[in-house]
Amino acid sequence: MIKMGKKKRRKKRGRLKTKNIFFTILVLGLIIWILCTHENKTEVVPANDVNNFSESIPDESYIATESQNITTEPVITTTVTTEPDIKMEYPVLSPNSKILSDEEITSKHAILIDTSNNEIIAYKDYSTRMYPASLTKIMTLIVAVENTENFDETELITSEMIEPMIEQDATRAGFAAGETPTITDLLYGLILPSGADASIALANHISGSESAFVELMNKKCQELGLKDTHFTNCVGLHNPEHYSTVQDMAIILQYAMQNDICRQVLTTYEYFIEPTEYNPEGLTLTSTMFQRMSGDEMEGVTVKGGKTGYTDEAGQCLASFAEINGKEYVMVLANNISRWYVVYDTLSAYSVYVYGGSSYIPPQ
């Protein structure tokens, strides 16, 4: 009787042991499944939601008019700490590419590109070195944006930044020594009024000095594969070793257009900075390009954005991009004798060689 009882208990224990093992495996499997499911469902915050650039831009900083091509609402963008993975290539000539004469384009250097197929539509001495003047600031903008993590950070404006620019008669945005504008403010001050003070402030904030910042600019040229561009400063002041071509500048502009923050700045007509004790009425920054054109003078053509430039040695320069029949085009002109002729060249070229319209005739 005792032996039989022990035998039965052994069988029962065996069955219990088997059930326990099965139950343990089942529980472990369930735990693993829950963990995997939870991991797969973990929300990934898009980069666009981090350090939103537009949060530092008040809505009232955009002053819209019907006749001007401007951004009326901030574009939601991301802070960029590394350069976008964008491969740039030189535009190509085709049998249809037109050589421009002096009668057609008064600027000494010109290039007009269809960005959809990277084809040159029209050109004039486009690969010869020229002085880019303040077109330089397009590269300054790119490097500043790509090396900024927080656009709400501020930079102290000092007399050391301003006085050399005054001595060299460089265009300034109007920041005063003692002010602490945000990086956002400086970006608009850099491009819209072409502020040399903003350029130097950005360079100091990011690299500690202008010379160190210029090294980043030239490094970016190498990354883009530019063949004939070299910078000696971040402002565009004349230096024999500070040069580019309209072809290279067109590539730089196209690259900037693909960055949301750069594009937003380049397409803005006007930006307002709140009053400070140094600027009691605030600062209204206005695009030098849109001060000379509304952008919609020609039928079928909308000039979206761009940058002007001028030094005695460089002449009048203008880099722009336009939308025509739903496509975007880039044009860079350099070394013109008149700031108005370079605008007329731009409007006429977009109209005649892309839209198929007439040349621009300035109002009398």
Image (spheres, rainbow, N blue to C red):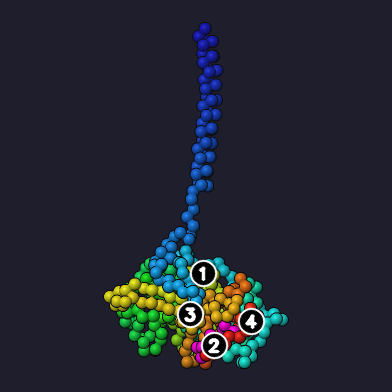
> Tag 3 or tag 4, which sits nearer the N-term?
3
- Whether the residues at callouts 1 and 4 have beta carbons within 8 Å, the answer is no
Within 10 angstroms of label 1, few (less than 14), some, or many (20 or more) residues?
Answer: some
Mark number, residue 362:
2
Q: CA distance from mark 2 to mark 1?
A: 33 Å
The residue type indicated by label 4 comes to Gly
State the image coordinates of residue 80 (x, y, percent, origin top left): 47, 66
Kind of element beneath mark 3: loop
Determine the residue positioned at 47% across, 55% down: 45
Kind of element beneath mark 1: loop
Q: Main secondary structure of the magenta part?
A: helix
Determine the residue positioned at 61% across, 86% down: 359
The residue labelled by disc 1 is 259
Within 10 angstroms of label 3, few (less than 14), some, or many (20 or more) residues?
Answer: many
Kind of element beneath mark 2: loop
> Tag 3 or tag 1, which sits nearer the N-term?
1
> Tag 2 or tag 4, which sits nearer the N-term?
4
Determine the residue positioned at 44% across, 60% down: 50
- Span highlighted in magenta in the image: 338-348
The residue labelled by disc 3 is 290
- Whether the residues at callouts 2 and 1 have beta carbons within 8 Å, the answer is no
- Whether the residues at callouts 4 and 2 have beta carbons within 8 Å, the answer is no
Q: CA distance from mark 3 to mark 2?
A: 15 Å
